[in-house]
Image (cartoon, rainbow, N blue to C red):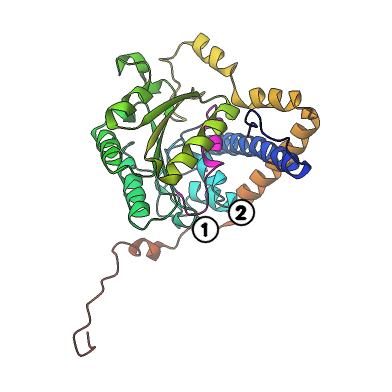
């Protein structure tokens, strides 16, 4: 996003495109926050089926990492990455219907949001064992490499999942094969209730990348500009056969592990300190310094996001429940009998 030293001044068209891009990033963060807050309220009204794992406070990560991605790229989000779906173009109504268990949801009411994916938008549904989706993303990256496709795979994981064996296996295999995959660690300092210092003896998860044969990067997960600029460089390099990379985003989750967790194990002063680093006001300050009327922009975007979220809720609530007999579908993959030499099965 920044012009390199010695570069020619940007044209009017380039300047306009950059402004539009920066304002869209702001809109995306605000939409994710508004969507998440509405989901939390709906959960308290018993309208959400399954657990709710808020990503409030971490919007800059999914926004900044997904913004440079292209059609055909593969993303394996975490249970806290509802924003990935919105960033990748999933219809908010279908996403809300998925959360409510409706037939119009991504899995047609057959599973909770936690496992809902959308392969049409390159999104692999999360798994209950966090970290186990990393080998899947590595498999997608291997396919891209074999077929010489200029796509990348992105796998999100938390610092807690980094202690799992399948995370090690995924990174080791990716390093050996130099696969086009980016591992994104959302380090929010708590693996459920276990603080970071009781889980690992190193300061940065990204330090482990060197042992696997590729580069690790550390960035503030509450600074959208920093995440976007780093992601753009890393994704471009990985896409051009640069091998895997690990991006560690230092952040903090405002809510407990899930909506039913009061997070009494955390210090209140710690929460206040991190809330003062909220990525949305931080980016608003940047936009204001760029000369934008942030009050007018905020008002317009708040109205727009409210309308989108309300339409999503209305669509989901008006959608039918799945029919009972649908529970008997999609249990097995269809069998294909090889044709005999005479053309008959």
Local secondary structure at mark 1: loop
Question: Which region of the structure is painted magenta?
Answer: 55-73
* Front in this rendered view, residue 246 or 23: 246
Looking at the image, residue 338 lies above or below residue 278: below
Q: Are marks 1 and 2 in contact (CB under 8 Å)?
A: yes
- Residue 21, position in %: x, y? 67, 40
Looking at the image, residue 95 lies above or below residue 196: below
View extreme (bottom): residue: 342
What residue is shown with label 1? 104
Q: Is residue 339 left or right of residue 25?
A: left
Q: Is residue 246 left or right of residue 290?
A: left
What residue is shown with label 2? 315
Estimate how packed mark 1 is, as few (under 14), some (14 to 19) or many (20 or more) residues with alpha carbons within 10 Å.
Answer: many
Residue 245 falls within the magenta-colored stretch: no
* Residue 51 seen in the figure: yes
Residue at 69% over, 39% down: 18
């Amino acid at each position: 996003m920044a012009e390199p030293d010695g570069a020619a001044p940007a044209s009017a068209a380039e300047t306009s495109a950059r402004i539009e891009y920066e304002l869209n990033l702001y809109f995306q963060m605000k939409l994710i926050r508004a969507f998440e807050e509405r989901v939390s309220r709906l959960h308290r009204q018993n309208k959400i089926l399954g657990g709710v794992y808020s990503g409030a406070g971490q919007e800059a990560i999914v926004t900044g990492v997904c913004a440079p991605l292209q059609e055909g790229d593969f993303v394996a989000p975490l249970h806290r990455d509802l924003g990935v779906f919105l960033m990748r173009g999933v219809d908010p109504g279908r996403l809300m219907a998925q959360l409510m268990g409706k037939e119009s949801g991504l899995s047609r009411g057959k599973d909770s949001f936690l496992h809902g994916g959308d392969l049409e938008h390159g999104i692999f549904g999360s798994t209950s064992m966090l970290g186990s989706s990393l080998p899947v993303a590595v498999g997608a990256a291997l396919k891209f490499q074999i077929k010489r496709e200029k796509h990348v795979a992105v796998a999100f994981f938390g610092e807690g999942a980094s202690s799992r064996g399948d995370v090690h296996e995924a990174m080791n295999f990716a390093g050996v094969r130099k696969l086009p995959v980016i591992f994104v660690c959302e380090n929010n300092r708590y693996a459920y209730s276990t603080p970071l210092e009781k889980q690992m003896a190193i300061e940065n998860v990204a330090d482990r990348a060197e042992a696997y044969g590729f580069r690790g990067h550390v960035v503030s997960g509450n600074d959208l500009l920093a995440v976007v600029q780093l992601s753009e460089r890393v994704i471009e390099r990985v896409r051009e056969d640069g091998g895997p990379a690990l991006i560690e985003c230092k952040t903090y989750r405002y809510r407990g592990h899930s909506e039913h967790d009061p997070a009494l194990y955390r210090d209140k002063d710690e929460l206040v300190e991190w809330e003062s680093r909220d990525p949305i006001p931080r980016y608003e300050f940047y936009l204001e310094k760029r000369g934008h009327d942030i009050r007018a922009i905020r008002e317009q975007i708040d109205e727009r996001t409210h309308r989108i979220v309300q339409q999503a809720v209305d669509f989901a609530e008006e959608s039918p429940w799945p029919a009972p007999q649908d529970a008997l579908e999609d249990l097995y993959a269809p069998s294909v009998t090889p044709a005999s030499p005479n053309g008959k099965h």
